[in-house]
Image: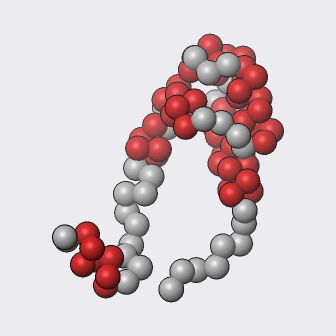
Amino acid sequence: MRGLVWETAEELDLKLAQRVRNIRRRRSISQKKLADMSGVSYGSIKRFETTGQISLVSLTKLAMALDIAGDLRNAFTQIPYQDIQEVINENK
């Protein structure tokens, strides 16, 4: 049985953007400097931090520039099975 979802996709995206922004600020990196470091435009970074909207490739570039790509690389790697049917399906 699936758990209840308490937030929208947009809310989840914005929380992710806030986390990335907090890491950037904690490291004293300006949006402009992060743009230079990552190759992602300043406008895209500003939009991401404001709205949560960004392309996956740009998010990956930001993660690499901030040296947090390992966290992105490990996303969805330790997902527990929801039921026995998933175990059966994986072994087919």
Provide residue 13's location: percent of width, then percent of height. Answer: 68, 50
Can residue 68 be seen in the rendering of this structure?
yes
Q: Position of residue 11 (x, y in %)?
A: 74, 56
Residue 40 position by quadrant:
top right
Seen at 50% across and 86% down, the residue is: 1
Q: How is the image coloured?
A: secondary structure
Q: Residue furthest top?
A: 36
56 vs 75: above or below: above
Say if residue 22 shows up in the picture: no
Q: Quadrant of the C terminus?
A: bottom left
The quadrant in which residue 33 appears is: top right
Q: Estimate the x, y position of residue 80 in percent, counting from the top left.
A: 39, 73
- Front-most of 63 and 6? 6
Q: Kindly identify the residue that appears in the image at 46 percent across and 46 percent down.
A: 71
Q: Does residue 48 appear to the left or right of 72 in the view shown?
A: right
The number of numbered badges drawn on the structure is 0
At 47% from the left and 44% from the top, the residue drawn is 72
**In this picture, residue 24 sits left or right of residue 89:** right
**Quick one: 11 or 37, which is closer to the camera?**
11
Above or below, 11 relative to 81:
above
Look at 37% across and 57% down and name the residue there. Answer: 77
Front residue of 79/37: it is 79
| Residue most extreme to the left | 92
